[in-house]
Amino acid sequence: MTTIDTWTWVVVRTPLAASILLPEIRKAVYGAASGQTVYHAQTMAEIVSKSMSPQRFPLILLGSFATLALLLASIGIYWRHLLFGHPTRARDRDSHGAWCREAGCFSFSRGARS
């Protein structure tokens, strides 16, 4: 004996809430065919939320790493400004310059001048 499963999907667009409209839809279905059942009724917002959930975690993770990178970059730029950006810290700047000459590194300001 072969059984055939038939599914019928009904989509209703309405400004009413689903809790108000669902009993009326069930009455209409039971009135048309008493053997039919209405189950697993969902709003479109629930369906979209379930379909987007696998993508939500990677996007949150990517956003948190991007925020962390931005924070670390801004702290680094501010730290560079505090150490070498003020004229009263010439002694620190000179010692850093001597170390850089020995190590072979350069700063952006020296690279832009040459």
Image: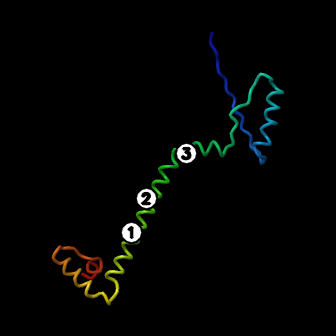
Q: Is residue 80 left or right of residue 38?
A: left
- Left/right placement of residue 4 relative to residue 26 reads left
Identify the residue position indicated by label 3 in the image.
53
Give the left or right position of residue 32, taking residue 101 as reference: right
Q: Amino acid at mark 1?
A: Ala
Q: Front-most of 111 and 72?
A: 72
Instruction: Kindly identify the residue that appears in the image at 32 percent across and 90 percent down.
Output: 88
Residue 30, position in %: x, y? Answer: 81, 27
The x and y percentages for residue 84 are 31, 82
Residue lying at the far left in this picture: please name it: 102
Drawn side of residue 17 relative to residue 78, left or right = right
Specify the farthest residue to the bottom. 88
Above or below for 114 versus 1? below
Q: Cα distance, mark 1 to mark 3?
A: 31 Å
Tell me, for residue 30, which label it has, or none. none
Q: Say which residue label 2 marks.
A: 65
Quarter of the figure with the N terminus:
top right
User: 11 above or below 97?
Assistant: above
Q: Nearer the viewer, residue 91 or 85?
A: 91
Question: Dot 2, crowdedness within 10 Å: few (<14), some or many (≥20)?
Answer: few
Marker count (numbered): 3
Q: Which mark is residue 73?
A: 1
Q: Amino acid at mark 3?
A: Ser
Q: Who's the residue at 65% across and 43% down the image?
A: 46
Judged from the image, the secondary structure of the residue bearing numbered disc 1 is: helix
Give whichever of discs 1 and 2 has the lower sequence position.
2
